[in-house]
Each structure stands twice: as structure tokens, then as C-alpha cells.
Image (cartoon, helix red, strand yellow):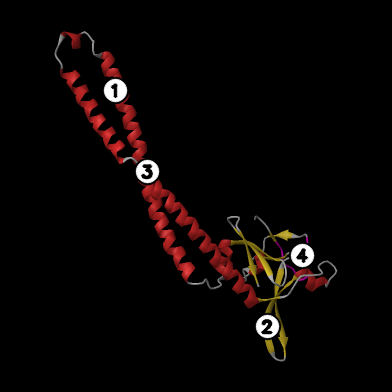
């Protein structure tokens, strides 16, 4: 990820280096046969122009190093990449729904009565501590209640720690739920409205694209997901 093949007028298959282009596909599109980047070309025939992408090795050296790389029309590439991004959005939407289901199930299994019970026990412990503290008796003066104090305080702080963890967990679930709802809205929009090709979006999401044949692309996203798309 730290380097890209450098696109040259006379390309080689081994030279690496940082490369930037106004066309995202110049940085991402590779030949599945020889590993050389593809280059954007303009074909003219009978006064009509057509934009295509071709393997640089095939352009520069003919079939010497690359015998089977296909020429792909740019419009077909754009449609295929947009289709892959739409599929990715649908996959993520399914993942989001699964996570939401897990959260809802966890929340439904939460014993809110247990929280209330702990709070009531905490209140009872504090009342007992106050009662022992205010006792004016010979036993209290002699320290006969010290063991009770120690036990009560130990239980008190243990319950407070448990409640703090439960509250933190609950807060985390609420934040996760809010985040998932926001993501769901975005993904639903992508699912219901096919993505239009955009160089900026492609750069943000896609690690590389391999042209496997005239009919098939492998599109690798930056999170490691690979999607196969037919041309």
C-alpha cells in the first residue's frame, strides 16, 4: 500500500514508486496476467473517439511479456466499479443489520431487575453503616462492630464497581445503536440508489483492481474484501 507501480511511457514490470494521476484507475487498475498497470488511451476510428484502457506492457512490447490482456472500454470499467461499490454497500448493510440484531438481543437479555436489586442493596448497606456509626454503646466504643464495617464497606464498593461497569456497558450500547442507525440510513441510500462512478470515492474505498479477462474484474477494497464483477 505504500507504493504503486510507476506508469511510464515505456513501462517495466518491476519498477515501483509513488504515482498520482487525475484518473483514479491509473493508480489502481492492473493486468491480472502480467501485473503491469493499465493506461488510459483514446482510440479514433471514422472520426469517432472511444476511451479504452490497455495493459502498458502490451502497449509497449506487444505480446512479448503479456499475451492475453484485454482492452476494456472505460464506460464498462466505470459501470463495473460502481456495481462493486453498490454490492459492498449491500454487504455492509447486511452486516449492520446483524450487529443491530445482536445488540437488541443483548439488551433484551439484560436483567434490569438485577440493576434495581443492586441499587436497593446498596441503599440498605449504607443505612446499616449509618446505623452502626450512630450507635452509642459500649460495643460500638470497643470496636466490636469493626468486622461488620469491613464487610459492609467491601460489599458496598464491589456493588458500586459492578453498577459502574453496567452503566458503562449500557452507554456503549446506546452509542453503538445510534452509530448503527446512522450507518443504516447511509447504506440504505446506497442500496436503493446505484452508485455513480466517482474518482474520489474510488480512491477512498478501493485498493486495486485486477483485469482477469475481458469478462471479469477482481476488485479489492481497502478493508480486505474482494468482489468479482462481470464486464
* CA gap, disc 3 and disc 4: 53 Å
| Position of residue 117 in the picture relative to residue 59 (left or right) | left
Task: Please tell me which residue lies in front, 74 or 93.
Answer: 93
| Position of residue 226 in the picture relative to residue 129 (left or right) | right
Residue in the image at 32% along x and 27% along y? 157
Which region shows up in magenta? Answer: 5-13
The residue positioned farthest toward the bottom in the image shown = 46
Residue in the image at 32% along x and 35% along y? 163
* For marks 2 and 4 on the same chain, the one whose residue lies earlier in the sequence: 4
Closer to the observer: label 2 or label 1?
A: 1
Closer to the observer: label 3 or label 2?
A: 3
Percent across and percent down for residue 50 are 68, 83
* CA gap, disc 3 and disc 2: 61 Å
* For marks 4 and 1 on the same chain, the one whose residue lies earlier in the sequence: 4
The residue at which mark 3 appears reads as 109
Kindly state the secondary structure of the residue where label 3 is placed.
helix
10 falls in the magenta region? yes
Kindly state the secondary structure of the residue where label 1 is placed.
helix
* CA gap, disc 4 and disc 1: 72 Å
Closer to the observer: label 3 or label 1?
A: 3
The numbered mark at residue 80 is: none
* CA gap, disc 2 and disc 4: 24 Å
The residue at which mark 4 appears reads as 33
The residue at which mark 2 appears reads as 50
Q: Quadrant of the N terminus?
A: bottom right
Q: Quadrant of the C terminus?
A: bottom right
The residue at which mark 1 appears reads as 153
Amino acid at each position: 500500500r505504500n507504493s504503486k507501480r510507476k506508469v511510464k511511457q515505456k513501462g517495466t514490470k518491476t519498477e515501483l514508486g509513488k504515482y498520482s494521476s487525475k484518473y483514479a484507475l491509473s493508480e489502481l487498475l492492473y493486468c491480472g496476467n502480467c501485473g503491469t498497470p493499465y493506461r488510459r488511451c483514446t482510440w479514433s476510428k471514422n472520426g469517432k473517439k472511444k476511451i479504452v484502457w490497455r495493459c502498458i506492457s502490451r502497449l509497449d512490447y506487444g505480446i512479448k511479456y503479456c499475451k492475453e490482456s484485454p482492452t476494456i472500454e472505460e464506460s464498462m470499467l466505470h459501470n463495473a466499479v460502481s456495481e462493486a461499490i453498490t454490492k459492498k454497500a449491500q454487504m455492509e448493510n447486511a452486516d449492520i443489520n446483524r450487529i443491530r440484531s445482536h445488540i437488541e438481543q443483548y439488551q433484551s437479555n439484560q436483567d434490569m431487575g438485577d440493576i434495581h436489586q443492586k441499587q436497593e442493596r446498596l441503599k440498605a448497606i449504607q443505612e446499616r453503616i449509618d446505623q452502626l456509626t450512630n450507635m452509642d454503646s459500649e460495643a460500638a466504643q470497643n470496636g466490636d462492630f469493626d468486622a461488620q464495617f469491613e464487610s459492609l464497606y467491601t460489599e458496598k464498593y464491589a456493588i458500586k464497581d459492578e453498577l459502574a461497569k453496567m452503566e458503562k456497558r449500557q452507554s456503549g450500547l446506546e452509542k453503538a445503536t445510534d452509530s448503527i442507525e446512522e450507518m443504516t440510513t447511509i447504506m440504505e441510500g446506497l442500496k436503493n440508489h446505484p452508485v455513480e462512478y466517482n474518482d474520489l470515492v474510488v480512491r477512498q474505498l478501493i485498493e486495486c483492481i485486477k483485469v482477469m479477462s475481458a469478462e471479469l474484474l477482481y476488485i479489492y477494497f481497502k478493508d480486505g474484501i474482494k468482489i468479482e464483477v462481470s464486464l
